[in-house]
Amino acid sequence: MNVVFAVKQYISKMIEDSGPGMKVLLMDKETTGIVSMVYTQSEILQKEVYLFERIDSQNREIMKHLKAICFLRPTKENVDYLIQELRRPKYSIYFIYFSNVISKSDVKSLAEADEQEVVAEVQEFYGDYIAVNPHLFSLNILGCCQGRNWDPVQLSRATQGLTALLLSLKKCPMIRYQLSSEAAKRLAECVKQVITKEYELFEFRRTEVPPLLLILDRCDDAITPLLNQWTYQAMVHELLGINNNRIDLSRVPGISKDLREVVLSAENDEFYANNMYLNFAEIGSNIKNLMEDFQKKKPKEQQKLESIADMKAFVENYPQFKKMSGTVSKHVTVVGELSRLVSERNLLEVSEVEQELACQNDHSSALQNVKRLLQNPKVTEFDAVRLVMLYALHYERHSSNSLPGLMMDLRNKGVSEKYRKLVSTVVEYGGKRVRGSDLFSPKDAVAITKQFLKGLKGVENVYTQHQPFLHETLDHLIKGKLKENLYPYLGPSTLRDRPQDIIVFIIGGATYEEALTVYNLNRTTPGVRIVLGGTTVHNTKSFLEEVLASGLHSRSKDSSQVTSRLASRR
Amino acid sequence: MASLDDPGEVREGFLCPLCLKDLQSFYQLQSHYEEEHSGEDRDVKGQIKSLVQKARKAKNRLLKREGDDRAESGTQGYESFSYGGVDPYVWEPQELGAVRSHLSDFKKHRAARIDHYVVEVNKLIIRLEKLTAFDRTNTESAKIRAIEKSVVPWVNDQDVPFCPDCGNKFSIRSRRHHCRLCGSIMCKKCMELISLPLANKLTSASKDSLSTHTSPSQSPNSVHGSRRASISSVSSVSSVLDEKDDDRIRCCTHCKDTLLKREQQIDEKERTPDIVKLYEKLQLCMEKVDQKAPEYIRMAASLNAGETTYSLEHANDLRVEVQKVYELIDALSKKILTLDLKQDPPPHPNTLRLQRMIRYSATLFVQEKLLGLMSLPTKEQFEELKKKRKQEVERKKILERRAALEPQRRLEERRSDLVSHATNGEVVSLRGGPAPLRKAEGWLPLSGGQGQVEDSDPLLQQIHNITSFIRQAKAAGRMDEVRTLQENLRQLQDEYDQQQTEKAIELSRRQAEEEDLQREQLQMLREREREREREQFQAASLHTRTRSLDFREIRPFQLEPGREPRNHLAHALDLGCSPAQSSAAPKTPSPSSALEPIRLWSGPPAPGQEFFPQSTTSQHNEVPSLNPFDEEDLSSPAAEGTASPPAAEPPLGPPACVLKEYNPFEEEEEEEAVAGNPFTSPDSPAPSPFDEEDGHPPQRPSGPPVPGSPFEEAPCTNPFEVDSESGQEGEEPIEEELLLQQIDNIKAYIFDAKQCGRLDEVEVLTENLRELKHTLAKQKGGAD
């Protein structure tokens, strides 16, 4: 069930199968991302892969002494490029791997192009998704829906991604979906269709309890992606943005050249692996320890290496030191930037109110706090808008709803119109009318008691009170209590036992907060393995773009204008 | 006692508090204690209790830590407070995901296509061959044309009003031209020409490839094979001077394309770029490293552990070899990096990138593997290590044997108990078969263990024996025996108590003034020796009375105490030498070996005698004590032969410092390891093999205040240091090598750092490099 491992295994297999010799890896835009998530350059270099080329790159030289490993998505475009490539081969031999099911006719046209008999292998290796963490994958689709329904292109991509995931994990699941979402049902059907069509591929060893695929829709919980985050991974994504494990730091004031873009990968960064789920305070102290540790090891400029032993020690420690120095400078920079942003944007205060809006039901206090923060000049327009959005979502139908007043405040604060418009769009996207379940007021007695107790005891950490709605859903699912009228099975058969292997897919994107939730569920629930996926992994900004792209705001006139502006900003 | 019997594997905890011997279990520890330290203070018993508790705690702690470790390694360093679920990072690795191959489909389609293509190419080449098969220069144009027309039918001029390639209308000015290969028509502009050399190349190559081609369409070619060769050679010789079409063949673009592609293929087949050659060499070197490095590491590890499996010289050679390969890798990758760099035009950026990457990965390889190469010990260090190792092995062996002995001893006890009712003769006949073999195996450890177990206080041992006899007798239901035995036991215990009170005083004193007790110790030794001799007499008498058992059967336990009072010195020597003798014994498990022990115990055996003179002399010099065990101790370092007299001098002094190291819970390895050697190499010049063995016995009965045996010190004493000093000259070249290696390393780092643009690091490194070079120069100067 480890998705990173699954993809990595595919890549390793490809490289192994090509035998010894210098190799070039030919990829397309998407597979480049897929590979880069699981392999580092130095790791792949050791396997004699020295060049990485894009299949669409025109500037490739003939290098007949190289073997080519082609890892491509089976798109029309790629097949065409490959046909051209085979007509005039640039490399001595080609090992072709498609990341998904390829049609017979495409295979035929490729075969006919291979007049020089350079192709040694044509296979499907189903690494057709971005493996972010062992339990988290993404398809990097932004803007998957038009209105309430799928963009057909993205639907097919999502179907491909999900089926590839199932194949790479060798799971032939039962499917449940969120009834309130048309998109979820559509995707479930498409996946089912592929499973039926490619039944030969999906013939795996039967497990006692069949795996379960649960398809959800983001609009059921629009709250989670609107919150500020305080665990390392989620926080970095929220404040700096993680794109295929890469973080753009070029906007950090006074950044040095080699830190403009850094890679945060739990696969080869021990510090990150150990800290990605810890909260900001803990990371602060850990980074301090890391620094101190590093200082000790650092060779001083004036430190004379007097004895041979000294030199030996130095030489032996050097690579370790160097590796560490990279890690240290990277994390110090990242954490430094995070804390700068936190204080600059007054995020502690903002987050506290956000959490209150998300988790408590005290309208007047919440309203008061939001109003207070809107007056604070340190609060950015982005944060102001998100506060108002949270308020709007939570107290949408509250009797003394004073959203218009808050909107006025926003205008007075000088928040641009595009942002103000987004408030109503978000409500349109994830408001009560849309939601299939109640986000804010608990329904069953247990949950009510829980909340009551929580209110009594107070919360340990005001910044991390919020539990994504996904937690409750999965909790019910694991206990076999997830209601079938809200999350029906696709097809007649239902799961009698409690599920063991669960794949959750969120249309409209997951978040790192949810990834953490799933991570914790995995660790705390014996016998259960959960993998979380989404069309993408959101932070607030990308979520708002997603909402915009869905075109739900089309009622307002200048929507297209906003979209284009936002797109251009991207 | 039995309740404490803990067969747990954790050894580290069960060290005797007095002699720090590592015992395998609570049971063994306890019995050891009672056997060896019987005369000592009752307080000691309290001590041992607390020790046992400590050990338990430690064990728990250790186990817990182990558990934590496991959990930690399990979660790859994640904070692990798992509640039963599994961290996604440690989900058990799954098999490779689903795959589907389209290769057979692909090949099917391709085969059809290739057949077509090959036929096409071959057709052209056959025609080309025919066209070049005659001497074109010396043939009239008309004749040529006739031949050309015979090769391929020309398309009728009237049928083609326009050039099929460019679409121009043919006229007087733009005339029709025929492709000589396919007969089609094109205009002059679209016409291509094939020169004779190219034609020759194509035809001769196709002949070469004939044998390899399997396509049936090619078979017609083979007919012309031999002929073609001779003819083409003729045509290539023929002079081509005139400007006519004599040296060229007209053809259309399509045919030319096909032929050019073919030419390209031929070229590629023949050409191997330099980079490939270099790269192959590089890979070969890397393979070599992959092969040799583990071997070297194994050697170095073994040498560093003081083992003598490999020779230091050999390892050094290997190291040099591996380093040479590294240098070669470095050189090769550098060469690849700079390949064609100065060429004009400069190579394609991708080529450069490839070269850079190869260099980079070679650098990574060198860095990673080179640093995995642990350094070898210098000769000096090696000697030291060897010594340590020997001690370790020694101790381990003893432990192992003792562990092996334990069940056997019990068995034998039980048996002897049983057979005690039988006559001697019966016993012998009964045991005739299996016994000798077992003894041959067991004899060694018996004597070894005996060294520790036996000649401690016989009282305690006796008590122990009797207790077990009582147990067995009870089990057997012989109540009368139980009664007598119990009485014996009481007597023994009284004696034991008395002893203990005496020892208590000593122990307290001992503990108080551990550091500078030498003199007093000697004094005490004497006193206690007398005392003990007296006690032992008593014990012996008791002993003989209580146990009318077959001597041969339970020899180690019975014989000796009986003898001890009479022949103390001989006994000591027995102990000392028995390991030496036994080294031979276990390998010959013949019936005769069963007899050997008896002979051995009945008098000082040969090896003992060898030691004897030496030991006595040293004894007289150093320790004019009555304790015969001490002299044995002294003799060992002396006899070991590394050999300066001062080595033997402080037999009691050093233990004090050894003692400090003896944290019972940490020492296990050393403790165990120091034990075993006498069996492997009793005469090797390294650490005194008898240390452990002899060390304990003399102490205990004589009660020197130091729990650590004096003999463990031996390796620390002078002889070996002297030795290592002498080895220092030999060490110089190694250091030089090391320096060279470090210089190489740093160079690699500098390169690396430069690549990464870490200039500050480059500076530091350069500084270091300078420094290293300086040292090297200095060393070289010194050496010269």
Image (spheres, rainbow, N blue to C red):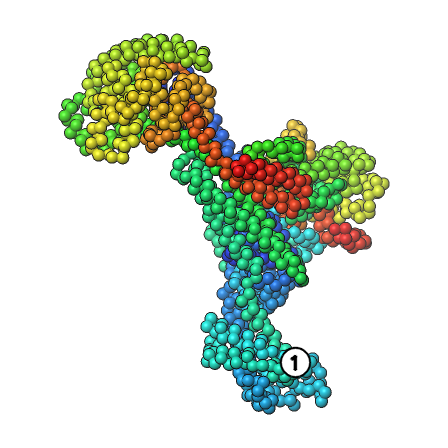
Q: Which quarter of the rendering shows the N terminus of chain B?
A: top left
Determine whether B377 is above or below B351 in the image. Answer: above
Q: Residue at x 64, y 57 (%)?
A: B341
Residue B269 in the image, given as x and y percentages of width and height: 53, 67
**Residue at figure coordinates x 61%, y 63% from the top left:** A62
Q: Which residue is mark 1?
A: B191
Which one is in front, B711 or B74? Answer: B711
Using residue B455 as the reference point, say whether residue B388 is left or right of it.
Answer: right
- Going by the image, does A35 lie left or right of A540? left
What chain does mark 1 sit on?
B
Q: Position of residue A76 (x, y in %)?
A: 63, 64
Pick the front one: B432 or A532 = B432
Residue at image location 49% in from the left, 46% down from the top: B322
Rendered position, B270 above or below B612: below
The image quarter containing residue A84 is bottom right
Say few, some or many: other residues with alpha carbon within 10 Å of mark 1 (under 14 / 14 to 19 / 20 or more).
some
Q: Is residue A155 above or below residue A86?
A: above
